[in-house]
Amino acid sequence: MDVGFIGLGVMGLPMALNLARSDTKIVVWNRTAARAEPLRAAGAAVAASPAEVFARARVVFLMLADGAAMDAVLGRGTPDFAANVAGRTIVHMGTTSPGYSRDLDADIRAAGGGYVEAPVSGSRQPAETGRLVAMLAGEQAAVEEVRPLLGPMCHESFVCGPAPNALVMKLSVNLFLITMVTGLTEAFHFADRHGLDRRQFLDVLDAGPMASGVSRMKAPKLMDRDFAVQAAALDVLKNNRLIAEAARERELASPLLDVCHALFGETVALGYGGSDMVAVLHAIEARTDGAGRR
């Protein structure tokens, strides 16, 4: 049977393209049909509905925005749900709360299907080059079925145990990413407003021990005020909220995350939700300029 892929957004489209180009026989569907045309050109079958994907595929990858979108595609809460998932392995590659994933796992297995969490670490560029990192969780047999299929999309994968451990791992990684990029952006703003040579600041950073793949990707965007999306500020705010909720459930302190949460909320309120996460610079600049007027 084909491999199914549903959700061809900023991340899903390049991921599905890498799968198609690896000679994997795939069938895809996206709510906005035009997004599937590059997949058709790459040799993938384009389904007319999610139900057609489930009918044709044994393993179905879902790269969707949130739980509501997943429930709608799966037909969860309707008689179609069991027909869609029974005898199939559903792979949740997006980012939702661990609690949502735990409940979905139980519902799918009760309906006779298999379930694997496989959220990925990385943004659009690693997705395009097949350099994402996958975290997997679920029953061993289902994980072993899915893991080889991730090769064209992910250069490494890690098995994290039962669901929702993979999503908790993803949120842990994202906590570091959010605080790191926010710190980089504040440092850039600090250097810039002191009149330093911005290019030299980037060169010093790149030559030292703090340099990383993330800094090398994001620092030039700050330099050029290039806010074209790799990871959208609105998605970062959503991740921030999910991490904060998971922290509160365990009564954990998250002081750095809480500051970032406020800043990304301000970034979105300023109208930059669809811009790259380095657009948090606008929120930091607004705070500086507001303080200067007082």
Image (cartoon, rainbow, N blue to C red):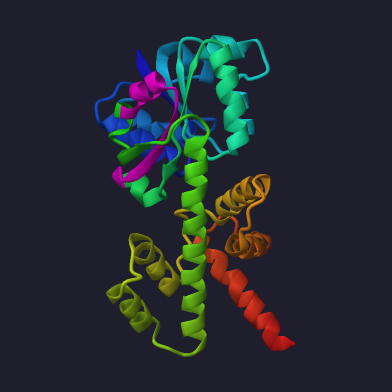
Viewer-side residue, 199 vs 255: 255
Residue lying furthest right: 294
In the image, residue 45 lies at what x, y percent? 37, 21
Q: 101 left or right of 37?
A: right
Asked if residue 257 lies in the magenta stretch, the reply is no
- The reply to whether residue 89 is visible in this rendering is yes
| Relative height, residue 279 to residue 62 (above, below) | below
For residue 203, which quarter of the picture? bottom left
Q: Residue at 54% of width from left, 30% of height from top?
A: 31
| Relative height, residue 32 to residue 73 (above, below) | below
Residue lying furthest left: 23
Residue lying furthest bottom: 195
Viewer-side residue, 54 vs 211: 211
| Relative height, residue 52 to residue 117 (above, below) | above
Q: Residue at 28% of width from left, 76% of height from top?
A: 207
User: Magenta region: which residues?
Assistant: 129-147
Viewer-side residue, 279 vs 157: 157
Q: Residue at 56% of width from left, 38% of height from top?
A: 65
Q: 124 left or right of 105?
A: left
Viewer-side residue, 292 vs 105: 105
Quarter containing the C terminus: bottom right
- The reply to whether residue 74 is visible in this rendering is no
Residue lying furthest front: 251
| Relative height, residue 119 to residue 106 (above, below) | below
In the image, residue 235 lies at what x, y percent? 56, 50
In the image, residue 6 lies at what x, y percent? 47, 28
Q: 152 left or right of 73?
A: left
Q: 230 left or right of 128?
A: right
In the image, residue 110 lies at what x, y percent? 58, 13
Q: Residue at 63% of width from left, 58% of height from top?
A: 253
